Image (cartoon, grey):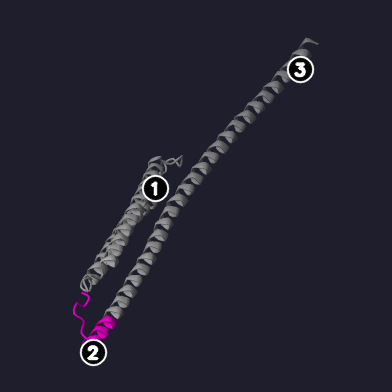
């Protein structure tokens, strides 16, 4: 009976060991699976973060292009307005010269009015055209600079990720923030300068209109 009891105990111990090994194997596989899921989640988050950075960079590029197109449109409208003003002044001058010539043949006045701004009209138009052209050229130059900076960030985006496929370096995000801040600061300064230029040109027109005749 003692031999039978001993044999049964050995079998129970062996069965217990097998169960323990099975449980340990399952626990180990569960830990490995959890680690794989964690790595996959980190990789997906890193990929999503890189994609968001790419969207922000492209948004900045599109904003720069839209601003450039908008400014080019305003510049063309200003040039068209200048051309119309110059044509109107030329017509007024021709009509005045024709009327003055006709009146001179009929009855020449003792003190005919003197046209002071006949030659300065072209100077005023030239000054306005030059100011608008300078601002437009500066806008295009700065827009190209910012756009090249954004394109460089896009080109460096794949290299910003860690070699192991983990989270990307923060340098790309920092560069993007700096580029956005630079763009906002320059846009604010440019708008202020544009307002000052328009105000100066408006004051010149007011002085010219008030001093056309004596």
Residue indicated by mark 2:
106
Q: Closer to the N terminus: mark 1 or mark 2?
A: 2
Q: Closer to the N terminus: mark 1 or mark 3?
A: 3
User: Is disc 1 in contact with disc 2, using a CB cutoff of under 8 Å?
Assistant: no
Crowding near the residue tagged with mark 1, few <14, some 14–19, many ≥20 C-alpha atoms within 10 Å:
some
- Residue 61 image-quadrant placement: bottom left
- In what element is the residue under mark 3? helix
Q: Residue furthest top?
A: 2
Residue indicated by mark 3:
8
Q: Is residue 37 above or below residue 141?
A: above
Which of 68/101 is in front? 101
C-alpha distance separating marks 1 and 3: 78 Å
Nearest-to-viewer mark from 1 and 2: 2
Q: Residue sitting at 38 percent across and 61 percent down?
A: 68
- Specify the quadrant that holds the N terminus: top right
Residue 47 located left or right of residue 31: left
Which of 89/26 is in front? 89
Magenta stretch: helix, strand or loop mostly: helix
Q: Position of residue 126 (x, y in %)?
A: 24, 68
Q: Is residue 75 above or below residue 114?
A: above
Per the rendering, the mark at residue 180 is 1
Q: Residue sitting at 45 percent across and 47 percent down?
A: 53
Q: Position of residue 95 (x, y in %)?
A: 29, 83
Q: Position of residue 214 (x, y in %)?
A: 23, 70
| Magenta span of residues | 94-114
Q: Determine if residue 126 is in view.
A: yes
Crowding near the residue tagged with mark 3, few <14, some 14–19, many ≥20 C-alpha atoms within 10 Å:
few
């Amino acid at each position: 009976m003692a031999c039978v009891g001993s044999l049964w105990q050995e079998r129970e111990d062996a069965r217990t060991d097998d169960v323990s090994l099975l449980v340990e194997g399952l626990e180990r596989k569960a830990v490995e699976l959890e680690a794989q899921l964690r790595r996959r989640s980190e990789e997906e988050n890193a990929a999503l973060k890189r994609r968001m950075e790419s969207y922000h960079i492209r948004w900045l590029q599109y904003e720069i292009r839209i601003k450039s197109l908008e400014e080019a449109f305003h510049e063309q409208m200003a040039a068209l307005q200048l051309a119309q003003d110059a044509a109107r002044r030329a017509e007024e001058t021709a009509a005045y010269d024709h009327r003055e010539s006709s009146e001179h043949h009929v009855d020449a006045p003792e003190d005919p009015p003197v046209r002071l701004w006949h030659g300065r009209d072209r100077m005023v138009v030239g000054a306005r055209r030059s100011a608008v052209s300078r601002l437009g050229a500066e806008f295009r130059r700065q827009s190209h600079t910012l756009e090249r900076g954004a394109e460089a960030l896009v080109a460096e985006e794949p290299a910003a990720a860690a070699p192991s496929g983990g989270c990307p370096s923060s340098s790309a995000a920092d560069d993007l923030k700096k580029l956005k801040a630079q763009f906002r600061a320059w846009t604010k300064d440019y708008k202020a300068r544009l307002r000052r230029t328009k105000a100066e040109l408006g004051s010149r027109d007011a002085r010219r209109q008030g001093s056309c005749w004596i």
